[in-house]
Image (tube, grey):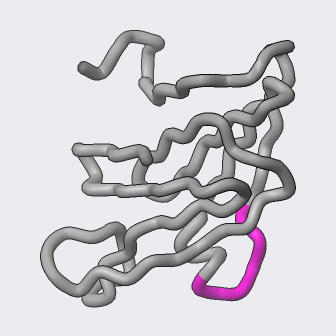
Amino acid sequence: MAVDNKSSTVCVAVDTKVYVAVDEATGTNFSQNCVSWRSLDLPTKITSLACTVDTIIVGEQSGVIRLYFDVIKSLDSNRIPAETLINWHQSPLATLQVSRNGESTF
C-alpha cells in the first residue's frame, strides 16, 4: 500500500495488480466520500509501490522500476498508461519513495 498525503492518493498492490482510489465526484484521487477503485494489471509481481497524483511507481523482484504516468485518465479511456522502465538494481526492491530532490518527505 502507498499513500501520498499531499494529493490524497491511495494505491494498493496485490500480486500483479495495482488499485488506485478515485473520487467519483471529480474523477481525480479521492477526497471525501464518493470513492471507487481503478485497477492496472502489470506483467510481473510487485515487490514495492509508491504513488503520487497520477503516477504509479512499482518495484519488481528483478530490480526493475516501472513508472506509469497519467494513470487515471488512461484507465478511464481504456488505454494503457504511458510507461518508463528503470533498470539499475540487481536485487528485488523492498521499498520505493518519491521525492522532488532526493530527500525524505517525512
Outermost residue to the front? 15
Left or right: 69 in relation to 22: right
Where 2 falls versus 102 (above or below)? below
Where 104 falls versus 50 (above or below)? above
The question of residue 78 being in magenta is answered with yes
Residues 80 and 96: in front is: 96
How many discs appear? 0
Outermost residue to the left? 32
| Residue in the picture at 26% in, 56% down | 8
Q: Picture coordinates of residue 47 (x, y %)? A: 65, 36
Residues 7 and 35: in front is: 35
Left or right: 98 in relation to 65: left
* Quarter of the figure that contains the C terminus: top left
Magenta range is 76-81
Left or right: 3 in relation to 32: right
- Let me know if residue 70 appears in the view: no
Where 78 falls versus 67 (above or below)? below
Q: Main secondary structure of the magenta part?
A: loop
| Residue in the picture at 65% in, 75% down | 74
Q: Picture coordinates of residue 25 (x, y %)? A: 26, 89
Residues 83 and 39: in front is: 39
